[in-house]
Image (tube, grey):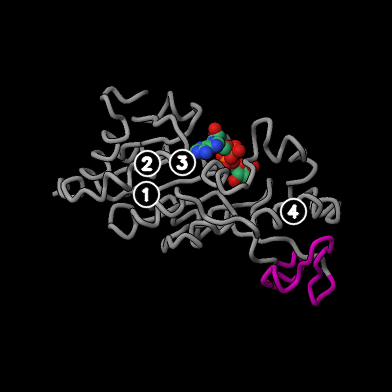
């Protein structure tokens, strides 16, 4: 569904302002402009690494050294990345009292680096390693160097504390994300192909709970024709940048009762 008005971004900003309680769901697309490849599409990580061979818990337990080849690339690329205008814009919207939480599928920590305070890491974070045997945790920077396969004090191989395919979502993150979706006025969905569950169920939960769904993505997704009220067809930094400028206008922020 496309916005009918002349300026769909302004129309969407009005809906955010009028309804309030804005919660954001982000995917890999928001970090593309920080130099981190997304997963799907011709330039995506999964075009280079078959996820069934490199990104399942089973594959990690079978051949951890092989899976660490892919993980090493992710740790290096994410480690060197900086937040972009979209990450900073969301932190600004939180500061203005427009957005109240970010649910992210990303494991790059860029929302927190941009200054967002309430961030629900639905798929974990690469900054921490966990032992698959004794569950001990370590900061990645203390245990991992390029080319190495990090080991726990117990001798077992460490895995980044991210959710691989076949692993459950951390229950607290799932609880918090669903609670935010059930109680938000608007769900702003940015840069996700909405193909991976249960993350792709969050917009449906929000919609069924009465929220408006605004989607920012250069491409349509399965959400666009199903739950999305306004599809803003553009890049995260372009659209969020424009929205933040609109919210600097006090009139824009005042309509909510
Ligand atoms: N701004 C906004 N959206 C963008 C941009 C951009 N600059 N560039 C690309 N996109 C969109 C793409 O059109 C695509 O719809 O971002 C989306 C990225 O989709 P995926 O690569 O599938 O990433 P994501 O949806 O986050 O994947 C979900 O799948 O592989 C697993 O665990 C991994 O968290 C990941 C999950």
Q: Residues within 10 Å of mark 3 (few under 14, many from 20)?
A: many
Left or right, residue 156 beside residue 174: right
**Range covered by the magenta-colored residues:** 130-155
**Residue drawn at 70 percent across, 70 percent down:** 141
In this rendering, the answer to whether 55 lies above or below 137 is above
Label 1 crowding class (10 Å Cα cut-off): few <14, some 14-19, many 20+?
A: many
The answer to whether the residue labelled 3 contacts the one labelled 4, judged by CB atoms less than 8 Å apart, is: no
The majority secondary structure of the magenta stretch comes to: loop
- The residue pinned by badge 4 equals 71
Q: What residue is shown with label 1?
A: 23
Ligand 1 quadrant assignment: top right
Task: Confirm or deny contact between disc 2 and disc 1 (CB under 8 A).
Answer: yes
Label 2 vs 1, first from the N-terminus: 1
| Placement of 42 over or under 156, stated as above or below | above
Name the residue rendered at 64%, 55% in the picture.
78
Residue 135, x across and y down, in percent: 70, 69
Q: Which residue is mark 2?
A: 206
Q: Which mark is residue 236?
A: 3
Which numbered disc, 4 or 1, marks the residue that appears first in the sequence? Answer: 1
Using the rendered image of the protein, determine whether residue 196 is visible from the camera's viewpoint: no
Ligand 1 within 8 angstroms of badge 3 C-beta: yes
Q: Secondary structure at mark 1?
A: strand
Q: Is 47 left or right of 246, judged from the image as shown?
A: right
Marks 3 and 4 sit apart, C-alpha to C-alpha, by 25 Å
Query: Where, quadrant-wise, is the N terminus in this rendering?
Result: top left
> Which tag is nearer the camera, tag 2 or tag 1?
1
The CA distance from mark 4 to mark 2 is 32 Å
């Amino acid at each position: 569904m496309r916005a009918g008005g002349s300026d769909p971004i302004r129309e969407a900003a009005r809906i955010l302002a009028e309804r309030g309680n804005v919660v954001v769901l982000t995917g890999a697309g928001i970090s593309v402009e920080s130099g981190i490849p997304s997963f799907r599409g011709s330039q995506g990580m999964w075009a280079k690494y078959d996820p069934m061979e490199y990104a399942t818990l089973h594959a990690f337990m079978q051949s951890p050294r092989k899976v660490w080849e892919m993980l090493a690339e992710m740790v290096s690329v994410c480690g060197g990345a900086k937040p972009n205008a979209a990450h900073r814009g969301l932190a600004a919207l939180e500061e203005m009292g427009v957005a109240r939480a970010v649910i992210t599928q990303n494991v790059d920590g860029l929302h927190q680096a941009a200054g967002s305070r309430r961030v629900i890491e639905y798929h974990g974070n690469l900054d921490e390693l966990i032992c698959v045997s004794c569950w001990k945790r370590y900061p990645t920077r203390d245990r991992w160097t390029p080319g190495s396969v990090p080991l726990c004090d117990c001798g077992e191989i460490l895995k980044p504390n991210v959710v691989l395919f076949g692993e459950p979502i951390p229950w607290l993150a799932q609880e918090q994300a669903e609670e935010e979706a059930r109680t938000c006025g608007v769900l702003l969905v940015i840069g996700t192909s909405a193909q991976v569950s249960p993350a792709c169920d969050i917009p449906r939960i929000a919609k069924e709970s009465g929220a408006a769904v605004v989607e920012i993505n250069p491409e349509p997704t399965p959400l666009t024709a199903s739950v999305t009220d306004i599809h803003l067809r553009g890049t995260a930094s372009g659209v969020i940048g424009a929205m933040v400028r609109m919210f600097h206008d006090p009139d824009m922020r005042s309509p909510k009762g």
